[in-house]
Amino acid sequence: MPSIKSFNPMIIEKKSGISYEEFMEDHYKARVPLVFKNASKDWKAHNLITPEYLKQNFSERSTIIGSKEYTIGEILEHVAVSTPENPAPYPAIFEIRTQLAEILPLIQPVNIGYAKPNWFESKAFIPGKMGNSLELFIGGVGCQFPFAHIDQYYTNAWITQVYGEKQITIFPQGQDEMLYPKPENPYVSEVNIFNPDYNKHPKFKYATPITATILPGETLFIPRGTWHTAQGLTTNISIIFDQINHLNFNQWKSDIWHFKKRNSLMNAVASYTYATAAGAYCRLNDLFGKT
């Protein structure tokens, strides 16, 4: 399997029992990634959501990967024989609130006591729209995003592993130049980090990634605006959600404008107006302690 061992990356810190206040000061506000070892310990999903469980209960639920529709049953068949040379179709993503709502009671509290306030929990935001995602990912051995990316809309990402193992590679702040953002989409790197072409991207050799293998029960916090990518080490299932609040709302709203404007100025104006109103509503809720 391709790796980034040649970079000699450092390891993302793992902690258990960290206080909310310590997390906010040392990681959230500072935009420093962290793996929580057992923050999702109250989730019933652990030791329950497995490939067998998904096949027995949701085999006919479907999603689009690339331009093709796959059922969960079909995805799991591909995942079972996935290899680095012939990986399963990826990413296999299901929006939990609209496609797998039965799983919601198994992942409470969603915010695991740390991802708060999260304005996406407000009814002001539509599930699955404008970065408000709560998703189940299914992957296999060798499934990967070879190109590092920044999540659209400047959200914080939270990844909880409920089955199998996944390696995450993160490039901490200040490395944009070494990652060669695409001119047409500056949130995606031109570099295949698992097989870089140093003649084409010579500055990438100076990049300093950090990595972590996310084990079942662990949760990774990826700060807003952070370059990252993922690689499946085994058959794996993850729950991933995004977060915004007053600290990243303005950048989120700016991204709403720029991404929507690509397709339609009218759509951009409508979305930006909606985002402004939703943000004002959430600020009031924060003020009165309702979030």
Image: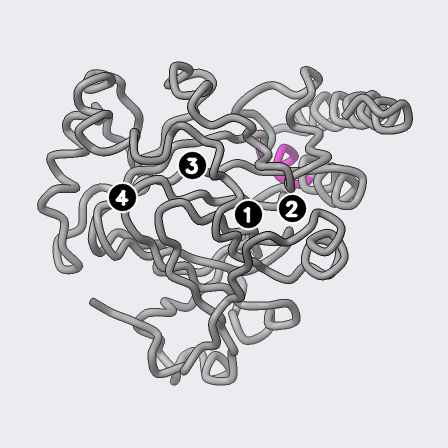
- Per the rendered image, the range of residues in magenta is 258-263
Q: Nearer the viewer, mark 3 or mark 2?
A: 3
Residue, far front: 17
Amino acid at circle 1: Asp
Indicate which disc, 4 or 1, sits on the residue closer to the N terminus. 4
Q: CA distance from mark 2 to mark 4?
A: 24 Å
Q: CA distance from mark 4 to mark 3?
A: 12 Å
Mark-to-mark CA distance, 3 and 2: 19 Å
Whichever of callouts 2 and 4 sits on the residue coming sooner in the sequence is 4
Q: Which residue is mark 2?
A: 154
Question: Which residue is found at the position 77% from the left and 22% from the top?
Answer: 278
How crowded pointer 2 is (Cα within 10 Å; few <14, some 14-19, many 20+) is rated as many
Closer to the chain start, of discs 3 and 2, is: 2
Q: Position of residue 148 (x, y in %)?
A: 45, 60
Q: How many marks?
A: 4
Callout 4 amino acid: Gly
Front disc: 4 or 1: 4
**Frontmost residue, 56 versus 5:** 56
Q: Reply above or below: 200 against 250.
A: below
Q: Are marks 2 and 1 in contact (CB under 8 Å)?
A: yes
Which residue is disc 4 drawn over?
139
Type of amino acid at the residue the image marks with label 3: Ile
Q: Position of residue 78 (x, y in %)?
A: 13, 39
Q: Which residue is mark 3?
A: 239
Where's residue 240, x and y in %? Answer: 47, 38
Pointers 4 and 1 in contact (CB under 8 A)?
Answer: no
Residue 183 showing in the rendered view: no
Q: Secondary structure at mark 3?
A: strand
Q: Which image quarter holds the N terminus?
A: bottom left
